[in-house]
Amino acid sequence: MVQPGRTPFHIQLADIIRHQIESGVFNAGDQLPTQMELMKQHELSSNTVRQAVLALVAEGLLYRRAGKGTFVAKRHIGRDLLTFSGFSEEAVARGFRPGTRHVTVDWRSADAAVAAALNVPTDESVLTIERVQTIDDEVVAVETVSFVAAIGRQMEKRDLADTSFTEILERQLGVALARARQEIRAGTACARLAKALDVSSGTAVLQIDRTAFDTNDRVIYFSSSSYRADRYIYTGWIERKSALVTQPRQLIGRSR
């Protein structure tokens, strides 16, 4: 129950509902009590309840359906912006169950983007693997990975359906992955991508391109992945560089 004090009532109510979601009182897909029910339960005005609900909608914890009510959203799949990890690795680390819905494997001529990333001539044949990725049986991403020929010839012999590429490279092939250049930008789903992700054509997606290198600075692969923007969130610490700071400061930790 909200209590009189310095904290505004709508913030207290938002905190109560947030705690109920985090503790399992409300689960993803559950309908929230109506505005009238929340008003009676907490003895608050309609405006206060509306402010609390809208704040949680803005946070992504709730979503509203016209004429239907307010519902608990599915938990965002967080990824660390500053950590080089694979799709499956990150999912398992955060308590999700990764999977693969569909896989295609073939040798393709490198287009301009792939050729530049892999540092090979345009039209050189590279192994390209496309996978539809799932989290807890829900499709969340379409991943296209191109490997340089030397690695590709070894990769195509492996089970590529439900195994982490990072695990195959490091544990099975002995490739020492070290760093990656990553570019994240906004995108929209074309008809083909929208069908794969089970969203409407034109829906916003998170487009992530990554070029991975080993400890000898050799390019190992280039990936171009499209993630459902309503399910993924990237987080990471950043630091401001200032002339007033004479000594570099070590980050204590990252928000997970």
Image: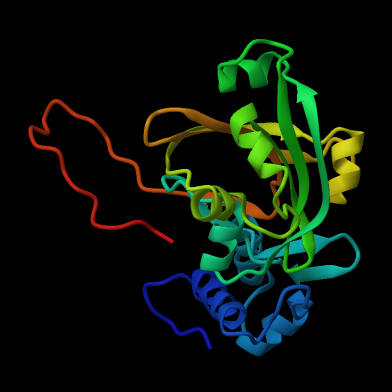
Depth check: 54 or 160 in front?
A: 160
> Image quadrant of residue 88?
bottom right
Q: Is residue 209 visible?
A: no
Residue 166 rendering spot, x and y as whole percentages: 55, 50
Q: Residue at x 79, y 77 (%)?
A: 31
Residue 221 seen in the figure: yes
Q: Nearer the viewer, residue 82 or 18?
A: 82
Q: Is residue 122 left or right of residue 211?
A: right
Farthest left residue in view: 246
Depth check: 53 or 174 in front?
174
Which scheme is used to colour this image of the protein?
rainbow
Q: Nearer the viewer, residue 116 or 160?
A: 160
At x 63%, y 69%, the residue is 96
Give coordinates of residue 233: x percent, y percent: 58, 51
Q: Residue at x 43, y 44 (%)?
A: 176
Q: Is residue 175 left or right of residue 59?
A: left
Q: How many marks?
A: 0
Residue 117 drawn above or below residue 198: above
Residue at 55% in and 70% down: 10
Measured as percent of width and height from the top left, residue 37 is found at 75, 84
Residue 99 percent location from the top left of the image: 73, 62
- Quarter of the image for residue 100 reads bottom right
> In the drawing, does residue 5 fall left or right of residue 170?
left
From the image, which quarter does the C terminus lie in? bottom left
